[in-house]
Image (cartoon, rainbow, N blue to C red):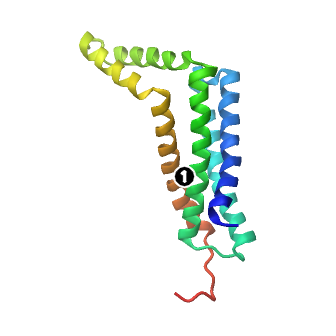
Amino acid sequence: MDTRKFSMNYGAYLGLGLVLISFTVYILGLEEQKSIIPSLLNNFLIIGAIAYSVTMYRDNLNNGFITYSQSLKIGTSVVFFASVILAFYTYIFVTFINPEYLENIIKIAEQEILNSDPEISDEDLDLALSMTQKMLQPQWMSTLSVLGGTFMGFFYSLIISFFVKKDDPNFIV
């Protein structure tokens, strides 16, 4: 099995797990409570999935050996494919499941701006809110979700790869 297909399979599992967490948070109403628990769950799931998938690749498909660069590539690819699935879910969520979600974010942003700077002019407030609205378009949210998720996966993979790498002693550089 090549690394792309392997990464797609494990990325699909991770992506579905992240979607399940996100949907559960929505059902339980935790996003309005500004709870840190969903973020912690997501990060622990991502870290665990990277470590598990790289270890599975090393032990089952690569004769028990994996280089740092192979591990980094697989970990980042797994999270990339998971991010694509999560971005697709996010698009569906904010477009069809809960379209008022974005309106609520804009209202919260307006309150936070007014709380941080009560003397802000109406022009500056409108400018800040229009920029926020532009970035909260579903297609931008999805794109930034993939980019941010992939970067985070790369960062986690940098660290995890250090611990799971196992060089083949028979391989001569």
Q: Is residue 33 visible?
A: no
Direction from residue 35 to residue 151 in the image, left or right? left
* Total numbered labels: 1
Q: Residue furthest right?
A: 60
Examine the image and state in which quarter residue 171 appears.
Answer: bottom right
Examine the image and state in which quarter residue 42 appears.
Answer: top right
> What kind of residue is marked 1?
Gly
Quarter of the picture holding the N terminus: bottom right
Mark 1 crowd level (few <14, some 14–19, many ≥20, 10 Å Cα): many
Give x and y (percent) for residue 23. 68, 29
Please tell me which residue is depicted at 26% across the width and 10% down the height of the picture.
122
Give x and y (percent) for residue 115. 37, 15
Direction from residue 123 to residue 81 in the image, left or right? right
Q: Which residue is mark 1?
A: 153
Please tell me which residue is depicted at 51% across the width and 43% down the height of the picture.
146
Q: Is residue 10 above or below residue 65?
A: above
Q: Is residue 66 above or below residue 99?
A: below
Q: Is residue 33 above or below residue 172?
A: above
> Which sits in the foreground, 25 or 4?
4
Badge 1 element: helix
Give x and y (percent) for residue 41. 65, 40
Please tell me which residue is depicted at 56% across the width and 24% down the height of the picture.
94
> Which sits in the foreground, 16 or 104?
16
Q: Is residue 70 visible?
A: yes
Q: Is residue 173 above or below residue 98?
A: below
Give x and y (percent) for residue 32. 58, 20
